[in-house]
Image: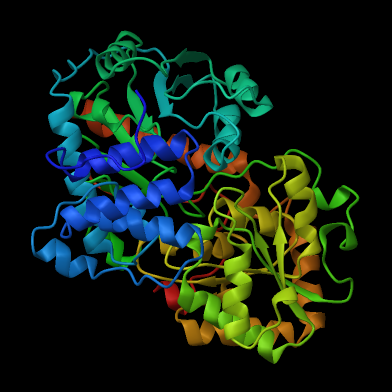
C-alpha cells in the first residue's frame, strides 16, 4: 500500500495517524512528509496526547525548539488519549505522567491480544529456563549492553532462550547473539499467538522483556502470561503499567523515591547499576585516532555529547552555550543525525547565544568500532535532560572520558547518575541546571583535575563494578532465583534488594543526592 503524504485522517482516528506516520518514518520518508501528516492529525485531534508528543519529538529530532511542547499534564487531566509512552520520556521528567502513559499503552496491548493464561507448570529439577524477548539482538544500543549478560550466564543453573522479534540485520553482533543463546527463535514475522505458543512450548520459567514499549517490543504477548513470571528490564526506562508484568529490575538510583511510587511492577534493586556492561575488546583508546581527522582543534577543550539529537533539550543546550562563552578555548562536539541534519540548527541557535558557529563540531555517524575509537578525543562528556545518557554514557566512561550528569526524577533521567555511582564518581552528579553548569565550568577551568579523572577511569575500568559483567550477571541470577522461589511458594511478587556478593562493595558510598 502506498501511503500518500497527505492522508485523509477523518474517521481513521488519531492512532491511525500515529501508525501511518511511524510506517512512513521507518520506510525512510522525508521528514517534511512525516511532519505534514502529524500536523494534519493534530489539527483534527488537538487534545490527543500521543499525537502531540509524536509531533514534539519529531521537532526535537531536528533541534527545532521553536515549537514549545504542550502542557501534557493538563491534556491528560482533561482525558486526552495517550499513545507511544516512549515519546513522552524524551519530553518530560514526570514519573506520574509517564506511568499514566504506560498504563494507557498497557490497556491497548490487553485489548489487542486477549489470549489464555499460561498453566502453572509442576516443579522439576531441571535448570531454570530464562527467556529474553527483544527486537534488538542486533547492532543497537540495547544489543551492545545485553550481549555480555547473555554470554556470562551460568549454564549449570540456567538454560537461556532468545526470542527475536525483528529481522536479522546481518551484523556481527547478531551472529554473536546466535552463538550466545542456548536456543534462539526468530519470530520477526510471527503473530502474537505464535510467539506466545513458542514461549509456552519451551516451558520458559522467567520471561525477561528487554524492549518494553520500543520498536519490535511486541508487548501484546504479555497479557497472555506466556511464562509464570514476567520481568521488565533494560530496554524501556520505566514502568510498563501492566498487571501481567511481575517485576521491574533497576537499582537504588534509577528507581528512586519518585519512581517507586509510580511503578506497577514489584521493584528489584541490584546493588551497583542496573545496566550490564561487558567490555572484552581492547579499550577504544588503543586504536589510533587524532583530533584533526575529526575536525577538532588540537588544543581545544572538547565538550562532547553523543546522545541522539532527540535527547537534547533547549534548556540544557542553553547551559552548554553559557559554558562556551565562559571558556573561549572550548568546542562542543555533537553527533549528527543524517535523517534530520540538526547541525545547521545547532549552529543557528549557538549564534543567537553569542557563540561562533564553528565552535559546534558535528560528528558523522560511524560504524560501532570507529565510533568507539574516537570517543577518547573528548575531554568531558555532557549529560542530557530529561532523557539522559544511557549506553552513550557508559561508552564515554569506558573510554576514560569523565561525564557530568544531571539527575532528575524519572528512570530515564537517573541512569547517568547510576553509571557515575558505579564508577565511583558521585561528585560529578548535579541535581539542577545551575549545579550542572557549575560543575562543567569548574572542570573546564581545571585541566589537571580532568587529567586526573581520565587517569582514574583508565586505570580502574577493569575493576569498577560498572564494567564487571560477570559480577552483574551473578547479581541478576540471584534475583531470578529469588523470584522463582517466591513463585514456587505461592507468594505474590514483592520488591526486594539483591545484596552485593561477599567481599564486594558497591561502586561508591551513598551520596547526599541519592538519599
Camera-side residue of 339 and 304: 339
Camera-side residue of 434 and 283: 434
In screen coordinates, is 150 left or right of 360? left
Image location of residue 3, percent across then percent down: 35, 32
**Going 18% across and 47% down the picture, which residue do you hit?**
103
**Going 23% across and 14% down the picture, which residue do you hit?**
121
Image location of residue 159, percent across then percent down: 47, 18
- Up the image or down, 228 lies above or below 48; here it is above
Q: How is the image coloured?
A: rainbow
**Going 38% across and 52% down the picture, which residue do you hit?**
35
Q: Quadrant of residue 346?
A: bottom right
Whether residue 489 is visible to the viewer of this picture, yes or no, is yes
Q: Quadrant of residue 260?
A: bottom left
Q: Residue furthest top?
A: 201
Image location of residue 354, percent across then percent down: 63, 88
In screen coordinates, is 493 left or right of 445? left
Quarter containing the C terminus: bottom left
Q: Residue furthest bottom?
A: 326
Q: Residue furthest left?
A: 78
**Going 34% across and 66% down the picture, which residue do you hit?**
92
In screen coordinates, is 23 left or right of 345? left
Camera-side residue of 414 and 504: 414
Quarter containing the N terminus: top left
Image location of residue 340, percent across then percent down: 54, 53
Amino acid at each position: 500500500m502506498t501511503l500518500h503524504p497527505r492522508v485523509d485522517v477523518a474517521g481513521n482516528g488519531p492512532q491511525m495517524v500515529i501508525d501511518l506516520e511511524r510506517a512512513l518514518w521507518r520506510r525512510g520518508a522525508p521528514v517534511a512528509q512525516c511532519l505534514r501528516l502529524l500536523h494534519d492529525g493534530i489539527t483534527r485531534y488537538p487534545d490527543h496526547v500521543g499525537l502531540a508528543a509524536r509531533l514534539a519529538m519529531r521537532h526535537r529530532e531536528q533541534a527545532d525548539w521553536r515549537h514549545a511542547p504542550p502542557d501534557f499534564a493538563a491534556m491528560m487531566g482533561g482525558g486526552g488519549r495517550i499513545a507511544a509512552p516512549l515519546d513522552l520520556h524524551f519530553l518530560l521528567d514526570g514519573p506520574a505522567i509517564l506511568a499514566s502513559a504506560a498504563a494507557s499503552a498497557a490497556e491497548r496491548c490487553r485489548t489487542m491480544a486477549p489470549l489464555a493464561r499460561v498453566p502453572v507448570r509442576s516443579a522439576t529439577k531441571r535448570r531454570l529456563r530464562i527467556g529474553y524477548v527483544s527486537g534488538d539482538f542486533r547492532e543497537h544500543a540495547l544489543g551492545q549492553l545485553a550481549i555480555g549478560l547473555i554470554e556470562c550466564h551460568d549454564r549449570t543453573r540456567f538454560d537461556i532462550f532468545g526470542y527475536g522479534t525483528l529481522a536479522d540485520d546481518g551484523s556481527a553482533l547478531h551472529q554473536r547473539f546466535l552463538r550466545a543463546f542456548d536456543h534462539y527463535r526468530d519470530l520477526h514475522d510471527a503473530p502474537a499467538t505464535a510467539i506466545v505458543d513458542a514461549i509456552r512450548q519451551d516451558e520458559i520459567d522467567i520471561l525477561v522483556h528487554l524492549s518494553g514499549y520500543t520498536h519490535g517490543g511486541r508487548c501484546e504477548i504479555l497479557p497472555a502470561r506466556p511464562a509464570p513470571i514476567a520481568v521488565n528490564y533494560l530496554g524501556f526506562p520505566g514502568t510498563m503499567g501492566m498487571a501481567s508484568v511481575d517485576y521491574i529490575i533497576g537499582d537504588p538510583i534509577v528507581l528512586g523515591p519518585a519512581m517507586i511510587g509510580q511503578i506497577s511492577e514489584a521493584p528489584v534493586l541490584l546493588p551497583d547499576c542496573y545496566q550490564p556492561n561487558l567490555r572484552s575488546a581492547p579499550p577504544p583508546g588503543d586504536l589510533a585516532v587524532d583530533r584533526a581527522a575529526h575536525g577538532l582543534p588540537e588544543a581545544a577543550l572538547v565538550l562532547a555529547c553523543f546522545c541522539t539529537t532527540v535527547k537534547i533539550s533547549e534548556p540544557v543546550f542553553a547551559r552548554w552555550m553559557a559554558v562556551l562563552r565562559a571558556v573561549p578555548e572550548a568546542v562542543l562536539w555533537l553527533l549528527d543525525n543524517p535523517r534530520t541534519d540538526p547541525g545547521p540548527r545547532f549552529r543557528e541557535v549557538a549564534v543567537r547565544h553569542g557563540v561562533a558557529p564553528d565552535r559546534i563540531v558535528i560528528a558523522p555517524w560511524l560504524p560501532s568500532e570507529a565510533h568507539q575509537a574516537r570517543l577518547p578525543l573528548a575531554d568531558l562528556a555532557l549529560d542530557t535532560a530529561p532523557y539522559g545518557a544511557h549506553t552513550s554514557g557508559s561508552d564515554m566512561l569506558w573510554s576514560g572520558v569523565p561525564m557530568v550528569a544531571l539527575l532528575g526524577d524519572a528512570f530515564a533521567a537517573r541512569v547517568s547518575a547510576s553509571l557515575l555511582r558505579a564508577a565511583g564518581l558521585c561528585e560529578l552528579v548535579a541535581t539542577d541546571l545551575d549545579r550542572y553548569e557549575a560543575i562543567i565550568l569548574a572542570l573546564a577551568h581545571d585541566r589537571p583535575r580532568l587529567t586526573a579523572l581520565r587517569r582514574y577511569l583508565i586505570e580502574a575500568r577493569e575493576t569498577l563494578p560498572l564494567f564487571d559483567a560477570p559480577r552483574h550477571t551473578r547479581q541478576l541470577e540471584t534475583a531470578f532465583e529469588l523470584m522463582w522461589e517466591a513463585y514456587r511458594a505461592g507468594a505474590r511478587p514483592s520488591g526486594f534488594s539483591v545484596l552485593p556478593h561477599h567481599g564486594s562493595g558497591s561502586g561508591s558510598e551513598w551520596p547526599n543526592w541519592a538519599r
